[in-house]
Image (cartoon, rainbow, N blue to C red):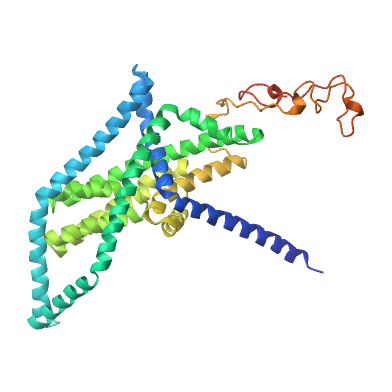
Amino acid sequence: MVPASVRGAAAWSWRLLMIAAGVAGLLWLLSQLKTIVVPVAIALLVTILLRPVRIALQRWGVPRGLATTLSIIGLIAFVTGLIVIAGQSIVNGFQDLWDQAVAGFDEFLSWLSDGPLGLDTATLSDLGNQAQDMVAQQSSSLITGALGAATTVGHVLVGIIISLFCIIFFLQDGRNIWTWVVNLLPIAAREKVHQAGRRGMVTLSSYVRTQILVALVDALGIGIGAAFFVPALAIPIGILVFVGSFVPILGAIVTGAIACAVVLVAEGWIAALIMLGIVLLVQQAESHILQPFLMGHAVSLHPVAVVLVVAAGSLAAGLIGALFAVPLAAVLNTVMQYLHGHDKFPELGTDDHLPLLRRRPSLADLPGTLLWPNRSGASEDVGAAPTTPGDVPAGPAHDAGPAGESRT
C-alpha cells in the first residue's frame, strides 16, 4: 500500500513538472520570436504613455486620427531632441575628457614605474606588446562580433518599424483589438478576463508613469551632481541615467558606476568619491521614498520580489528580461488576484463591457435539420433529447450577445 502522503506528493510532482515544462516552452517560444515580441511589448508601454496625450487632444476638438498622429510625432521629436542635445554635449566635451584620460593614463604608468611595484620601462613595454599581440590573435573574433553587431542593428531597425506600426494601431484602435482578443476565449471566461485585463492595464499605467518620474528624479540628481565636476558631459550623463533607470536596480548601479568613472577620469579620486556619495544619496532617496510612496499601491511588489524577478528576467532574457520583468510581474499579480476573488481596484467597478461575438449556430439550432430537437418524431429517435412545451431551442441569441445584455 502506498501511503496517502506519497500519492499526494506524486500528484503534485507531475503537475508541477508539467507546469514547469509549459513555462519553459513558452519562454523558448518567446526567445525565438523576440524580434516581434519585444517591439510589441515596447509599443504597449509607449501606447500607455501616449494615451493621455491623445485623449487630451481629443478633448480639445482634435479628431482621433490626427490626435494619434500628433502624439507619435511629439514623441519622436522629443526623443530626437534628447539625442541631438546629448550628441552635441558629447562632441563638445569628448576632446577634453580624452586629453584628461590620456594624462591620467600617463600618471598611472608613472606610478607603476616609480611606485611600490617598481616596474621598469622594459617591463611596461613588454606588457604593451603582449596586449597588442593578444588583440591581433583575436582579430577573427572581433570581425565575427562586428558582423553580429551589424545583424543586431538590422533587427533593431525591424523592431522600430514593428513598434511604430503597433503604436499607431494600439492608439487608434486599441479597444477593438482587445475586444477581438477577448472574443477568442470561451464565452464563460470573457467577462472575467476583460475585467481582469482592465485592472492589469491600470497597474501597468501606474508603473510606467511612476517609473518615468523616478527616472527623471535620478537623472536630475545625478546630472546636477556631475555638472560640478564635468559640466560638458552632465547632460549626456543625465540622459544615460534616465534611460538606465527603466531597468530596476541593475540600471541604477550601471549608470551610477559610469558617472563615477567619468568623474574619476576627469577629476581624480577625491571627486570620484564625492560623486559616488551623490549617486548613493539619490538612489537611496529613490528606493526609500519615491518607490514605496508612488508604486506601493499600484504595483504591490515587495523589494525582495523585485530583486528576484529582475534576477530571473536577466538570467532568462538578458537586458530585455530585466527591463520587462517587473511590469510583467506586477500585471500578473493584479490579474491573478482578481481572478481569485481579490479586487485591487474596486473603484473601477464592472460596468465597462465589451461587445461579444455571437456563437455560430449549430445544426441543433436550425429548424428542419435531423438534430433539431423540436422536429416531428424527434422524441422517438434514439438519443434524441425529450421535449416539453416550455423548451426553447438554444439559439445564438440565448448563448451570447453584447456584454451587459440579459442572457438565458
- Position of 196 relative to 229 (above/below): above
User: Left or right: where does residue 5 sit relative to residue 199?
Assistant: right
Residue 187 in which image quadrant: top right
Residue plotted at (53% across, 30% down): 179
**What is the x, y in percent for residue 188?**
66, 34
Answer left or right for 163 relative to 376. Answer: left
Is residue 120 at least partly visible in the picture?
A: no
Residue 168 in sight: yes
Question: Residue at horizontal 23%, vertical 73%?
Answer: 137
Between 12 and 376, the residue placed more toward the observer is 376
| Residue 177 appears left or right of 285 | right
* Quarter of the view holding residue 42: top left
Against 56, residue 340 (above or below) is: below
Q: Position of residue 375 (x, y in %)?
A: 84, 22
Give me the residue at 31% from left, 44% from top: 157
Nearer-the-camera pick, 101 or 22:
22
* Residue 299 rendering spot, x and y as whole percentages: 46, 44
Position in image of residue 206 (x %, y %): 42, 38
Furthest residue in direction right, as rendered: 380
